[in-house]
Image (cartoon, rainbow, N blue to C red):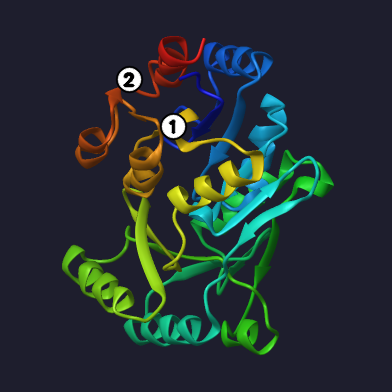
């Protein structure tokens, strides 16, 4: 069956180490779009960060952001699905993280919240320097995260970075967070976990997108490299693991392509789409 939709992870898949898209990969994606294939970026990133690359590629399709918590067409503004963290669960997560005295960041659909300026917030500040005003990430440093609850702010993801936490303590924290009702944790990068609604993952996001466009899952190719890509790789007609993917992702995939450094997305498109 012909592929009608291509779901592509970003970091470690579409993007190289300096967050750039190789010209060959861009060319193959554009050729796929010209053939009538929808190209959907599926990422753990916040929506505006993915929107930048979707506009660059001129995908004119949905973006699955925050691991499926917020799915929207960037060009039309149509929100296909949104599943923020439940308020009671959000409070429990805050209580737990604050009890462990660890640093974390929170994300709305286009807003980044942190309790202090840190490496991540500085990256977003640098990001905003190259963006048009309408594409910038709203960066807010706040004193009290519980204010988000009081003000009914929808939070789609909480990011807990692993870099400055002992491995054994990190696993204790993750286990504690996983035990909270309606909460799910997943790695989108080797050094961090995303804390999200337990009804959220990229696979569920992909299902909503396919329903929106009237496309069957067996007409989909999904490509990724990390734990948060597993669900969409498993349900797609063709699930592709990058050459640099984690071993469990490779085991779940139908096919393993080249690494992101060696333009694995382009190679997979050449094999299955064009």
Residue 109 placement: quadrant: bottom right
Residue 260 placement: quadrant: top left
Residue 9 visible in the current orientation: no
The N terminus: image quadrant: top left
Residue 228 drawn at (x, y percent) = 38, 49
Residue 49 placement: quadrant: top right
Mark 2 surroundings within 10 Å by alpha-carbon count, few (fewer than 14), some (14 through 19), many (20 or more): many
Q: In this view, does 95 lie above or below 72?
A: below
Mark 1 surroundings within 10 Å by alpha-carbon count, few (fewer than 14), some (14 through 19), many (20 or more): some
Look at 42% across and 80% down and name the residue there.
93
Look at 57% across and 35% down and name the residue there.
215
Residue 78 drawn at (x, y percent) = 76, 51
Query: 211 or 187, which is in the foreground?
Result: 211
Residue 167 visible in the current orientation: yes
Q: Which of marks 1 and 2 is nearer the N terminus?
A: 1
Query: 178 or 7, which is in the foreground?
Result: 7
Look at 37% across and 75% down and name the residue there.
102
- The residue tagged 1 is 218
Q: In this view, does 178 lie above or below 46?
A: below
In this picture, residue 251 sits left or right of residue 4: left
Residue 169 drawn at (x, y percent) = 21, 72
Question: How far is disc 1 from disc 2 in space, using C-alphas?
Answer: 19 Å
- The residue tagged 2 is 257
In this picture, residue 69 sits left or right of residue 159: right
Q: Is residue 3 above or below residue 88?
A: above
Tell me how many marks there are. 2
Q: Is residue 164 above or below residue 99?
A: above
Q: Of tags 1 and 2, which is closer to the observer?
A: 1
């Amino acid at each position: 069956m012909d592929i009608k939709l291509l779901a592509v992870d970003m970091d470690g898949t579409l993007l190289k180490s300096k967050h750039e898209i190789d010209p060959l990969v861009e060319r193959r994606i554009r050729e796929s779009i010209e053939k009538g294939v929808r190209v959907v970026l599926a990422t753990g990133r916040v929506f505006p960060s993915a929107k930048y690359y979707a506009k660059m590629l001129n995908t004119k399709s949905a973006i699955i952001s925050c691991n499926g918590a917020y799915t929207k067409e960037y060009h039309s503004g149509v929100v296909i699905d949104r599943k923020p963290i439940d308020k009671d669960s959000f409070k429990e997560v805050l209580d737990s993280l604050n009890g462990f005295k660890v640093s974390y960041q929170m994300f709305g659909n286009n807003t980044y919240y942190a309790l202090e300026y840190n490496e991540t917030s500085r990256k977003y500040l640098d990001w905003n320097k190259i963006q048009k005003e309408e594409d910038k990430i709203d960066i807010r440093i706040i004193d009290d995260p519980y204010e988000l609850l009081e003000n009914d702010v929808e939070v789609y993801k909480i990011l807990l970075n692993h870099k400055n936490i002992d491995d054994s303590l990190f696993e204790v924290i993750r286990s504690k967070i996983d035990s909270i009702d309606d909460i799910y944790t997943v790695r989108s990068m080797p050094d961090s976990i995303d804390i999200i609604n337990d009804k959220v993952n990229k696979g569920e996001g992909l299902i909503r997108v396919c329903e929106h466009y009237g496309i069957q899952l067996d007409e989909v190719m999904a490509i990724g490299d990390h734990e948060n890509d597993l669900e969409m790789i498993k349900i797609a007609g063709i699930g592709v693991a990058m050459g640099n993917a984690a071993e469990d992702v490779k085991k779940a995939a139908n096919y393993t392509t080249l690494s992101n450094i060696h333009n694995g997305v382009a190679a997979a498109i050449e094999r299955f789409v064009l």
